[in-house]
Image (spheres, grey):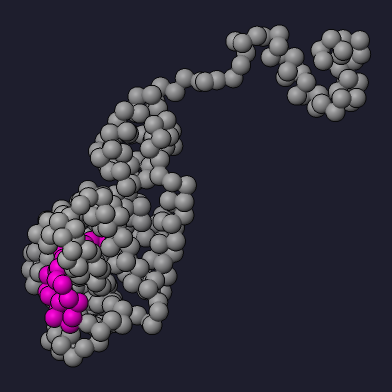
């Protein structure tokens, strides 16, 4: 092609062949320069240095995407960008599937749609529900747990073969005990005060419309707790309890489903182990990379409040 062009101007040749002039000139420059003129691969010293470390984090937390790995590395003092972590993990084929972030965004939409007026402190809104898990030994167990909507803090588990009002009550008692342990005092003294009335706000305990939450036993228990206000979601509206459902999904898909759990004792140990990871180790994208315990202790770190201050 180059020989044929030698007898006519470059512009005329490109016009006849339909080759863009810039493309043809680039081809000529590459042919004259030889192999040395080929593009890349360019040096990537940052990614080269980060690759073994990022791979180690990905191996330790195989259920997490590159953004969560990046937040965790940054919290541990490694100043790398999210794109560098992504490239390092891509080299070793350690990235999550393509639809991973899309699924996370769908969960985020459900969380944002849960309430029109967003909580701004811990212990404003709790979410309670049950989730089922079957052990290798054949037992089917129901985990009941309360999570704090604002901080995403997981208060603890009540595990039982049933999901009755009594089981729901035990889960709430565990949550109250954990909140009092964190706050160092009775629950009534830990609740936020309304700026309009000056009265202590009750915790909105959100549940679905399951039988355990509609029975007389649970109603009597709530009536005996002046700090709690029970609110049931609309029928067929699981998104209104989205934070609770999302946390159960993390428990199962990031931990329980990745191993064989034989019996109740092992299930209880593994669930409690993951609760510690969830509250104290796992960076949460919805919390701008912070852990729930950090938001619980310092609510101003929450991205919702920090964005308002800017």
Give yes or no for residue 53 being in the magenta stretch.
no
Tally of numbered tags: 0
| In-front residue for pair 139/111 | 139
Q: Which residue is drawn at 25% across and 68% down?
A: 131
Up/down of 41 relative to 159, above or below: above
Q: Quadrant of residue 119?
A: bottom left
Quarter placement of the C terminus: bottom left
Q: Which residue is drawn at 47% across and 51% down?
A: 99
Please state the horizontal and vertical placement of residue 165, each as a whole percent of the image: 17, 82
The answer, for residue 49, to whether it is visible in the render is yes
| In-front residue for pair 151/254 | 254
* Residues drawn in magenta: 151-174
Please state the horizontal and vertical placement of residue 46, each as a whole percent of the image: 39, 26
Q: Residue at x 17, y 55 (%)?
A: 261
Please state the horizontal and vertical placement of residue 274, each as a whole percent of the image: 19, 54
Q: In which quarter of the image is residue 139?
A: bottom left
Up/down of 274 relative to 235, above or below: above
The answer, for residue 298, to whether it is visible in the render is no
């Amino acid at each position: 092609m180059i020989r044929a062009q030698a007898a006519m101007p470059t512009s005329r040749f490109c016009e006849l062949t339909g080759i863009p002039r810039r493309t043809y000139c680039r081809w000529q420059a590459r042919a004259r320069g030889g192999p040395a003129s080929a593009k890349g691969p360019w040096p990537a010293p940052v990614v080269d240095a980060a690759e073994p470390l990022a791979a180690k984090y990905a191996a330790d937390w195989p259920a997490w995407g590159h953004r969560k790995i990046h937040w965790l590395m940054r919290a541990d003092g490694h100043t790398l960008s999210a794109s560098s972590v992504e490239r390092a993990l891509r080299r070793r084929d350690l990235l999550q599937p393509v639809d991973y972030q899309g699924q996370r965004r769908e969960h985020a939409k459900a969380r944002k749609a849960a309430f029109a007026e967003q909580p701004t402190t811990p212990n404003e809104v709790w979410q309670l529900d049950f989730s089922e898990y079957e052990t290798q030994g054949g037992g089917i167990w129901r985990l009941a747990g309360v999570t704090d909507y604002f901080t995403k803090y997981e208060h603890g588990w009540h595990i039982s073969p049933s999901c009755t009002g009594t089981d729901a009550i035990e889960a709430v008692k565990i949550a109250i005990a954990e909140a009092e342990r964190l706050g160092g005092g009775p629950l009534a003294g830990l609740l936020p005060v309304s700026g309009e009335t000056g009265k202590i706000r009750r915790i909105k305990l959100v549940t679905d419309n399951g039988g355990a939450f509609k029975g007389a036993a649970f109603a009597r228990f709530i009536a005996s707790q002046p700090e709690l206000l029970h609110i049931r979601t609309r029928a067929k509206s699981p998104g209104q309890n989205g934070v609770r459902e999302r946390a159960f999904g993390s428990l199962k898909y990031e931990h329980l489903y990745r191993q064989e759990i034989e019996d109740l004792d092992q299930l209880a140990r593994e669930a409690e182990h993951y609760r510690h990871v969830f509250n104290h180790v796992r960076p949460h994208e919805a919390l701008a990379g912070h852990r729930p315990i950090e938001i619980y202790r310092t609510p101003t770190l929450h991205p919702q409040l920090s964005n308002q201050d800017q």
